[in-house]
Image: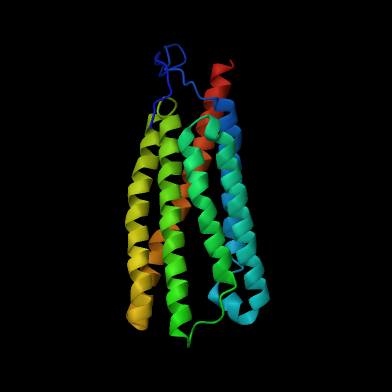
Amino acid sequence: MDQMYETNERQQPDNIVETPRVNVEILAKWIRVLFWISIASVAAGGLTGDAMKELAPAVSIVGDIIIAAVSAVYAAVLFKIASEEEDYRKAAIFRIPGIVFSIAMVFLPDYEDNLGIAIGALILSLLAMVLDLVSSYYEYGAHASVLARVDVVMSEKWERLWRWTIGMTVGMMVCLIFAVIAPFFGLLLLLAASVGMLVIGIMRLVYLFQTGTAFRNYSNYMNQ
């Protein structure tokens, strides 16, 4: 990714700083918005669990639709801040097909006793995971890039999170395949991988909040 910075580094208020060419006020505002959108998605996810699907299928469908809508808003915000780093635009573009696949999954009929539908659902799930992985690659890389001269430690955290994300996502894909071939064993593996993805999801929320805070603090400091 292109480094969009001009040099003049300042670690303490009385030293010289490498001044970023990105608009830190825009990033401070909209990355914090990404954080709250992600919180809304997590809240909607509470409507889509297996227990909810059994007790209130209609509520579960509504939850899936809300998640897709929230994901679309997230993509719109990524487009909004693409003026500061082009990889945000790429992240948004790769997020859109995943939203379409997710909606298609909602309206698939019950595939418990239908191997053809089960295979179709598996293919859609894998495609959605691949697209989400590519979107995450560009988004995390963009975060790391715009942070490089604002908060180097935070920038490195996003780079590490990407490596952990790809590892866990590949693990989830393998588990999905096993869930079709050997349901019991596959579901056990899927449970373990889901815990790992949950941890990564929590870290992503924390990092989004910290990134927004880093830009806000930098903006306040530069306006002093």
Residue under the image location 37 percent in, 77 percent down: 179
How far from the left and from the top, in percent, is residue 181?
Answer: 33, 80
Name above or below for residue 37 compared with residue 180.
above
Residue placed furthest toward the bottom: 113
- Left or right, residue 99 beside residue 207: right
Q: Locate the C terminus by quadrant.
A: top right
The answer to whether residue 205 of the structure is visible from this angle is: no
179 or 107, which lies in front? 107
Judging depth in this view, the residue of 51 and 130 nearest the camera is 130
Q: Nearer the viewer, residue 124 or 39?
A: 124
Whether residue 69 sits left or right of residue 119 in the image: it is right
Q: Position of residue 110 (x, y in %)?
A: 54, 82
The residue lying toward the viewer, choosing from 4 and 165, is 4
Name the residue located 66 percent from the left edge and 67 percent from the top edge: 62
What colour-coding does the image apply?
A: rainbow
Up the image or down, 110 lies above or below 200; here it is below
In this view, 185 is above or below 68? below
Q: Residue at x 63, y 63 (%)?
A: 65
User: Would you identify the image quadrant in which residue 186 lies?
Assistant: bottom left
Residue 187 as seen in the image, left or right of residue 20: left
Quadrant of the image containing the N terminus: top left
Find residue 107 and report its horizontal and vertical position in percent: 60, 73
Q: Position of residue 70 (x, y in %)?
A: 62, 54
Q: Is residue 186 visible?
A: yes
Count of labels shown? 0
